Image (cartoon, grey):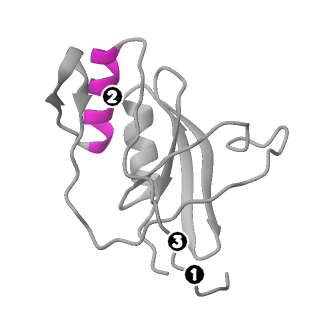
């Protein structure tokens, strides 16, 4: 990676629109320990503390037949251990989607929640 440009406009919010909100909330609580603040229309907000953790985003090319490289968008959650989080996800009704991979100075993996939504997992990294 090169260049001295400071990128602006990091991703600061995501939404998971579930078929079964209560089941989805239970899954994310079991795997990630999330608690919720209920807003308008019953929307369950997840608030995170401010961090000085580096943020990373990117645009990739579709790779037919490669899990995680389908057209669309992915989001990644910061976790302490990919393997432990994958295990928790499977125990809570999710599935492993992409095995842990090391690339460009960080490690990531992907799971699917019980509704089949892909969720990226990334371990702490430094720039």
Per the image, the residue denoted by label 3 is 7
Which of disc 2 and disc 3 is earlier in sequence?
Answer: 3
Q: What's the mark number on residue 52?
A: none
Part of the protein shown in magenta? 21-32
Tell me, yes or no, whether the highlighted magenta stretch contains residue 26.
yes
Q: Residue at x 17, y 25 (%)?
A: 39
- Rendering quarter of residue 71: top right
Q: Main secondary structure of the magenta part?
A: helix
Q: Secondary structure at mark 1?
A: loop
What is the secondary structure assignment of the residue under circle 3?
loop
Q: Residue at x 79, y 51 (%)?
A: 61
| In the image, residue 85 above or below residue 1 | above
Tell me whether circle 3 and circle 1 mark residues in contact (CB < 8 Å).
yes
What residue did someone put label 2 on? Answer: 27
Q: Residues within 10 Å of mark 2 (few under 14, many from 20)?
A: many
Q: CA distance from mark 1 to mark 2?
A: 39 Å
Task: Name the mark on residue 5.
Answer: 1
């Amino acid at each position: 990676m090169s260049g001295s440009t400071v990128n602006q406009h990091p991703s600061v919010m995501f939404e998971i629109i579930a078929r079964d909100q209560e089941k989805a909330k239970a899954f994310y609580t079991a795997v990630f320990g999330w608690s919720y603040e209920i807003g308008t229309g019953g929307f369950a907000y997840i608030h995170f503390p401010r961090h000085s953790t580096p943020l990373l985003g990117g645009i990739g090319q579709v790779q037919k037949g490669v899990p995680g490289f389908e057209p669309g968008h992915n989001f990644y959650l910061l976790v302490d251990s990919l393997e432990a989080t994958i295990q928790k996800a499977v125990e809570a009704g999710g599935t492993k989607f992409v095995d842990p991979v090391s690339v460009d100075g960080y490690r990531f993996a992907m799971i699917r929640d019980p509704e089949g939504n892909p969720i990226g997992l990334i371990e702490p990294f430094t720039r």
